[in-house]
């Protein structure tokens, strides 16, 4: 928008009042914000949180958006971009039907998870998160030693979803002590929790108590229902 504004021109008074002169527009931050506010009002889609058809207002949860179109996760049908399809998030890369086999990735997974059942479960986890579905009402925990591949798996998943659609959370964000912590979940597809380090037996009761305290908030998030969050200097937000 800033670039577009800088290419605009404004009329200024010249020697002849009937023929004003054109001068380059020098936009300020207020100019940009006013235009953004006007666009938000003009393009707001009431009640649209999940993939849906703007024409029928019916949800279309089986579709996954890419930069070059959308893919039906059940049928494998790929369609070009469609103005009727609404979604808040999309992958930051194009869909490639004839993509080569990811040899290095598969070798990494075989080394990390020798059991094929574990690899299949990880694949199901990735697919569930990428689909944006919430009907299973679950969240996932990666358990393992430091430097054991958990960070690599998380970074790959974030790259698939798009970093702007991801957010980081800590246990203190979920225990209710920080009223504004949940506002960063608005419009995001993935929340990644920080590592929980257990250095001694004395840490286990402390961590167990923290997980117990945050369990209700975790259930609220995974249920998929609309929730309210405090927002600093503003009204409540829904996510």
Image (cartoon, rainbow, N blue to C red):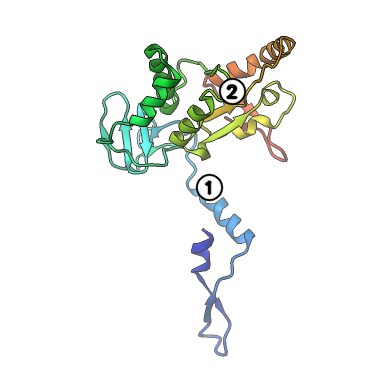
**Residue designated by label 1:** 40
Hey, which quadrant is residue 215 in on the image? Answer: top right
Going 28% across and 36% down the picture, which residue do you hit?
99
> Could you tell which of marks 2 and 1 lies nearer the N-terminus?
1
Front disc: 2 or 1: 2
**Residue designated by label 2:** 146
Left or right placement of residue 79 versus residue 15 in this view: left
**Whether residue 97 is situated above or below residue 21 in the rendered picture:** above
Residue 108 in picture, x, y percent from top left:
41, 26
Secondary structure of the residue carrying tag 2 is loop
Going 39% across and 32% down the picture, which residue do you hit?
52
Total marks shown come to 2
Hey, which quadrant is residue 195 in on the image? Answer: top right
Pick the front one: 215 or 12: 215
Residue 85 in picture, x, y percent from top left:
36, 38
CA separation in Å, label 2 and label 1: 44 Å
Pick the front one: 128 or 13: 128
Q: Residue furthest bottom?
A: 15
**Residue 143 appears anywhere in the view:** yes
The quarter of the picture where the C terminus appears is top right
Residue 16 in picture, x, y percent from top left:
54, 89
Going 41% across and 23% down the picture, which residue do you hit?
109
Left or right placement of residue 104 versus residue 171 in this view: left
Marks 2 and 1 close (CB-CB < 8 Å): no
């Amino acid at each position: 928008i800033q670039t577009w504004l800088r290419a605009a021109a404004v009329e200024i008074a010249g020697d002849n009042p009937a023929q004003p002169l054109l001068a380059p527009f020098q936009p300020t931050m207020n100019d940009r914000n006013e235009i953004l506010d006007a666009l938000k009002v003009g393009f707001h889609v009431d009640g649209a949180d999940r993939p849906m058809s703007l024409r029928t207002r019916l949800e279309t949860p089986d579709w996954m958006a890419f930069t070059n179109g959308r893919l039906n996760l059940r049928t494998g049908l790929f369609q070009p971009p469609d103005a009727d399809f609404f979604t808040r998030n999309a992958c930051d890369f194009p869909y490639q039907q004839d993509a080569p086999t990811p040899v290095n990735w598969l070798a990494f997974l075989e080394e990390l998870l020798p059991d094929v059942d574990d690899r299949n479960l990880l694949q199901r986890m990735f697919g569930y998160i990428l689909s944006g579905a919430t009907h299973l009402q679950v969240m996932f925990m990666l358990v393992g030693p430091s430097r054991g591949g958990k960070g690599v798996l998380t970074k790959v998943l974030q790259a698939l979803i798009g970093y702007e659609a991801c957010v980081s959370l800590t246990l203190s964000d979920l225990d209710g002590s920080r009223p504004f912590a949940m506002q960063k979940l608005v419009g995001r597809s993935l929340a990644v929790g920080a590592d929980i380090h257990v250095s001694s037996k004395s840490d286990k009761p402390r961590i167990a108590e923290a997980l117990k305290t945050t369990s209700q908030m975790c259930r609220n998030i995974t249920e998929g229902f609309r929730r309210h969050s405090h927002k600093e200097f503003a009204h409540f937000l829904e996510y």
